[in-house]
Amino acid sequence: MTVDTGQVQLLEELTATLIPSDDTPGAREISAHLFVLKMLDGCSSAADQEKFMKGLTAFEAASKSSSGNGFADASAAQRAALLTAFEGGTTSSPEAVYFYSTVKKLTIQAYTSSQFYLTRVRVYELVPGRFHGCVPVRGQPAAA
C-alpha cells in the first residue's frame, strides 16, 4: 500500500482528533497513524487496502464538501462537526464510513497497547502474575 505525505498527514490529524493530547500523551505522541498504516499493510488483504484507500479519498472529499477545507487544514470545530456526522450515520459514502471506522478502531487499539497506556493508565502485569510462595492457603492449616 502506497500513501503520499498528504495522506499520512490526514491520518495523523484524524488520529490526533480522535484521541487528543492534554496533560497525557495523545494519539499523535504515540504515532497511532503509523500503527494504522502498519496494521493495514501487514494484516489486511489487498482488497481491504484498496477499499481503505478509496475511503480515504472519499473522507477527504467529505471534509472538503462540508467545510471547504481538507481535513488537515480544517479548524477544530469543522473537524468535530465532520466526525459527529460520521458518528451519527448521516454520511452517504460507504467507503468513507469504512475508512473512518477502520481508523477509529485501529487508533484505539494503538493507544490501548502503547507503552504509556500499559505503564501509566492500566498497569500491565505478565501472566501468571506475581508468585507468593510463602503464603498459607485459606482453610488449610499452616505448615509447621
Image (cartoon, helix red, strand yellow):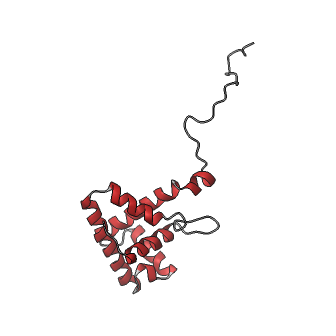
Q: Residue at x 39, y 78 (%)?
A: 6
Q: What x and y, as percent, mark residue 57? A: 31, 75
Q: Quadrant of the C terminus?
A: top right
Residue 101, image quadrant: bottom left
Q: Is 134 placed left or right of 81 in the picture?
A: right
Q: What x and y, as percent, mark residue 113? A: 51, 53
Q: Residue furthest left?
A: 47
Give whichever of 3, 49 is nearer the camera: 3
Vertical relation: 74 (above or below) 30: below
Q: Residue at x 36, y 77 (%)?
A: 60
Q: Is 138 placed left or right of 58 in the picture?
A: right
Q: Residue furthest right?
A: 144
Give whichever of 92, 118 is nearer the camera: 118
Q: Is 84 placed left or right of 26 in the picture?
A: left
Q: Residue at x 41, y 85 (%)?
A: 69
Give whichever of 137, 82 is nearer the camera: 137
Q: Residue at x 41, y 84 (%)?
A: 67
Q: What x and y, as percent, mark residue 107? A: 46, 61
Q: Residue furthest bottom?
A: 68
Q: How many marks?
A: 0
Q: Residue furthest top?
A: 144
Q: Quadrant of the N terminus?
A: bottom left
Q: What x and y, as percent, mark residue 21? A: 58, 69
Vertical relation: 7 (above or below) 49: below
Residue 93, image quadrant: bottom left
